[in-house]
Amino acid sequence: MNRIDDKRRRREKRKIRIRKKISGSKKIPRLTVFRSNRYTYVQAIDDSLGHTLASVSNREKELLMLKNQVADAHKLGQKMGERLKEKKIKRVVFDRNGYEYHGIIKSLAEGVRKAGIEF
């Protein structure tokens, strides 16, 4: 296998291992992150119903100027925190989706925390 396939396979294994342990509810949703080379997507999911309660990405019109970088991920996290507060959600379970907790993922999580959401 080539290097990219190995990297993707290891991330999928981490993702499955993490998802065995955590799930979200209406009061405490699962905050999941997907990161592509160009965009970052964040969703708050109620796993009992399978519904997305809130979401944010840097593909949205007002957030299109944000790049897929550490500093901009912090701003994206703050925006997600604001949207969660609008829905009266104070706590979440963080699902890093198999990504390592550093760089963009860490910055995004710190942005959500800065907005006042507990992990």
Image (spheres, rainbow, N blue to C red):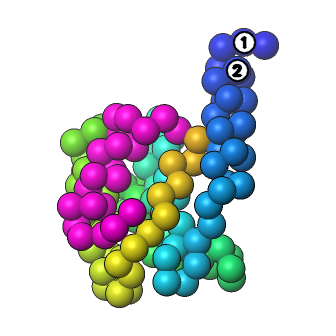
Count the marks.
2
Residue at x-position 53% and y-position 55%: 95
Toward the viewer: 63 or 11? Answer: 11
The percent coordinates of residue 35 (x first, y second) are 49, 44
Dot 1: what SS?
loop
State yes or no: residue 55 in magenta.
no
Residue type, mark 2 in image: Asp
**Extent of the magenta region:** 99-119
The spot of residue 65 in percent (x, y) is: 25, 51
| Label 2 element class | helix
Q: Quadrant of residue 25?
A: bottom right
Residue at the disc numbered 1: 2
* Depicted 111 relative to depicted 81: above or below: above
Placement of the C terminus among the 4 image quadrants: bottom left
Quadrant in the picture for residue 86:
bottom left
> In the figure, is residue 18 to the left or right of 101?
right
Residue 73 disc label: none
Q: In screen coordinates, is 59 left or right of 25?
A: left
In the rendered structure, which amino acid carries the disc numbered 1? Asn
In the rendered image, residue 21, in percent from the top left (x then y), is placed at 66, 56
Tell which residue pokes out farthest to the right in this image: 1
Is residue 93 left or right of 118 when viewed as pictured? right
Residue in view at x 70 percent, y 20 percent: 6
Q: Is residue 38 visible?
A: no
Q: Nearer the viewer, residue 22 or 62?
A: 22
Q: Which mark is residue 6?
A: 2
Q: Is residue 24 at least partly visible in the picture? A: yes
